[in-house]
Amino acid sequence: MSLTSELADPRGKLARWCARVFTGTTAAARRIEEATNGVRPIRPALARPPRQHWAEIGGAFGQRIADLVQPAPPYYALLGM
């Protein structure tokens, strides 16, 4: 089963865990949607930025979201030690 399907099934273990741990997610998403409604997205100045640009932005954004959701040690970095 795909991750999307698992999360969409309210009877699934992962969906139940997310509902228990990430309380208030729906309200937070609604507030973000209301705050950004009608705001134009910021685009890079370059006509066509390299593909790596989007990967770096996605990685930085993903890390910031992860830090807000569940602060935890950088396990992947610690594995190298």
Image (cartoon, rainbow, N blue to C red):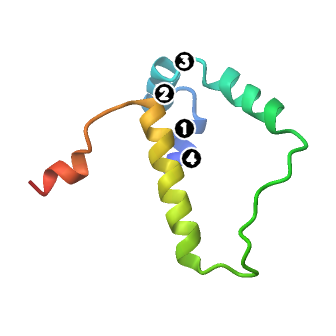
Distance between the Cα atoms at labels 1 and 4?
Answer: 5 Å
Residue at the disc numbered 4: 4
**Looking at the picture, how far across and down is residue 44, in whole percent?**
71, 69
Q: Name the kind of residue labelled 4 in the image.
A: Thr
Residue at point 72%, 78% (across, down)? 46
Residue at the disc numbered 1: 7
In the rendered view, would you say 66 is above or below 47? above
2 vs 3, front mark = 3
Q: Is residue 75 left or right of residue 61?
A: left
| Mark 4 Cα shell of 10 Å, populated few (<14), some (14-19), many (≥20) | few
2 vs 4, front mark = 2
Q: Is residue 71 left or right of residue 35?
A: left
Q: Name the kind of residue labelled 2 in the image.
A: Cys
Distance between the Cα atoms at labels 2 and 4?
Answer: 13 Å
Q: Name the kind of residue labelled 1 in the image.
A: Leu
Distance between the Cα atoms at labels 1 and 2?
Answer: 8 Å
Residue at point 51%, 23% (across, down)? 22
Residue at disc 4, secondary structure: helix
Q: Nearer the viewer, residue 31 or 3?
A: 31
Q: Nearer the viewer, residue 49 or 18?
A: 49
Residue at disc 3, secondary structure: loop
Residue at disc 2, secondary structure: helix
Distance between the Cα atoms at labels 3 and 4?
Answer: 19 Å
Mark 1 vs mark 2: which is more N-terminal?
1
Residue at the disc numbered 3: 23
Residue at the disc numbered 2: 18
Residue 50 placement: quadrant: bottom right
3 vs 4, front mark = 3
Callout 1–callout 2 Cβ contact below 8 Å: yes
| Mark 1 Cα shell of 10 Å, populated few (<14), some (14-19), many (≥20) | some
